Amino acid sequence: MGQDQINVSRNEVAAKPIPPVTESKQTQTIGGMLSAAEELLLKKVMNAFGNPPVHVVLWDGREIPTPDGNSVAHVLLRDRGALMKLIADPGLNFAELYSAQRIEVKGDLPEFLEAVYQVWPVSSHSKLRELLAPLIGLQRNTFSKARSNVSHHYDIGNDFYKLWLDERMLYTCAYFASPDLSLEDAQLAKMDHVCRKLRLQPGETVVEAGCGWGALSLHMAKHYGVKVKAYNISKEQIAYARERSAKEGMNDLVEFVEDDYRNVSGKYDAFVSVGMLEHIGVDHFQELGAVIDHCLKDEGCGLIHSIGMNYPRPIDAWAERYIFPGAGPPSLGQMMQIFEPFNFSVLDVENLRLHYARTLEHWLRRYEVNADKVLAMFDQEFVRAWRLYLAGSIATFKTGDMQLFQVVFTRAANNQIPWTREGLYQQQSSRRG
């Protein structure tokens, strides 16, 4: 895993005779007072972060070690302006400054961020933003805005994602039935895990909302004998999925539709959405519930897989601005707005939080191996921003700041449901071929 290196030389002060008090000496005294003020401001910044075990190095070589001398990383502030921006808004501006190379981190970046998140006081989040969390971003995922938001993240080039995703291009949490699984095997296991939860049978019909690059749709059709209609508004992803479907001879079983989930039509035995819910906005959850209600058969089953929160609040401001505009991972309580108005019964909830942390570790390792190729595609600020995004995501899942929910549901009157979870964990896969 790549690490940013710092080379900071400490100031060496030679002993000299004490000169008479002059204007230059007064200037030095003022400079000393300013340095003391800067160190005080830095201590306030560190206090805002919860005083993580970090050794700080300032632009002029001054060092502020941890009280006990133990640190997970060294952090260099390259200029006085960086300190001022940290004081103004530590959460947002740290990421911006890191991306712009005005802050450097020497040490393991995910470990450093995890240490910060572990001690960052909850009270540091804006209370007003927490109170307004259900309202933040209302109408930001209308038909036109949703397409723009998705394009910002997913249409930056398939070649970029090919550098660090698995061979099937799955950009969602994998399932590590064994911690030492490869990323490819864990993503395959995730798709089988989803299919077993849906209890797919040959000849059934499935609708997928937000299909990514098409891997799950093609897997369901090829290995479970179902017919799939998959919706997505990302031009890049749909083009890739269609090309792959044609190459694999799956066009008779899988149809990829470039359209919004709100335009889903038809009746299906199963509804599935993996990694879309966090992008549609809580104010559209009942809309999604209505779509499921009109497309799911009486004995149909559904599964929604989504990044989530333990309580309602906005996503990190930097990630929302630069990486995932319009995103808003929900709490479980908020997810119930999909089910309750339409009398859907929740059958199963599973939290794969640590599986997502492991998935991201694989992604970051591959990203670092290919960082030079990413630089050739974009620029250094992009390379660093995405490094920080992946490393920060590892830290948020490891510290419990983010969750990964899989929720299985059906209609209230449907009695064709399993008695136990035994079928989910059978050693022999239920898929064909």
Image (cartoon, grey):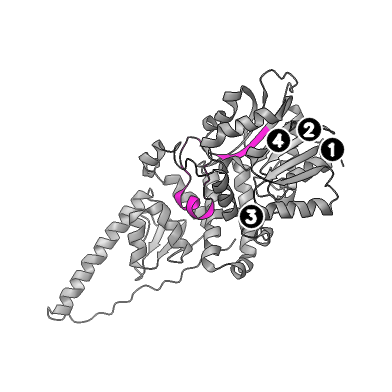
Question: Sequence-wise, which precedes: disc 3 or disc 2?
Answer: 2
Query: To which residue does mark 3 refer?
Result: 363
Magenta-tinted stretch: 303-328
- Horizontal side, residue 127 vs residue 113: left or right: left
Q: What is the C-alpha distance between the residues marked 4 and 1?
A: 21 Å
Residue type marked 1: Gly
CA neighbours of label 3 inside 10 A, class few (<14), some (14 to 19), many (20+):
many
Q: Secondary structure at mark 3?
A: helix
Is the residue under label 1 in contact with that under label 2 (CB below 8 Å)?
Answer: yes
Position of residue 323 measured from the top left corner of the image (x, y, whole percent): 53, 54
Q: Nearer the viewer, residue 130 or 65?
A: 130
- Given the image, on which type of amino acid does mark 4 rest? Ser
From the viewer's side, name the closer residue of 211 and 333.
211
The residue to which callout 2 is attached is 200
Measure how far apart labels 4 and 3 are at the Cα level.
Answer: 35 Å
Residue bearing the label numbered 1: 225
Residue 283 falls within the magenta-colored stretch: no
Position above or below: 53 against 13: above
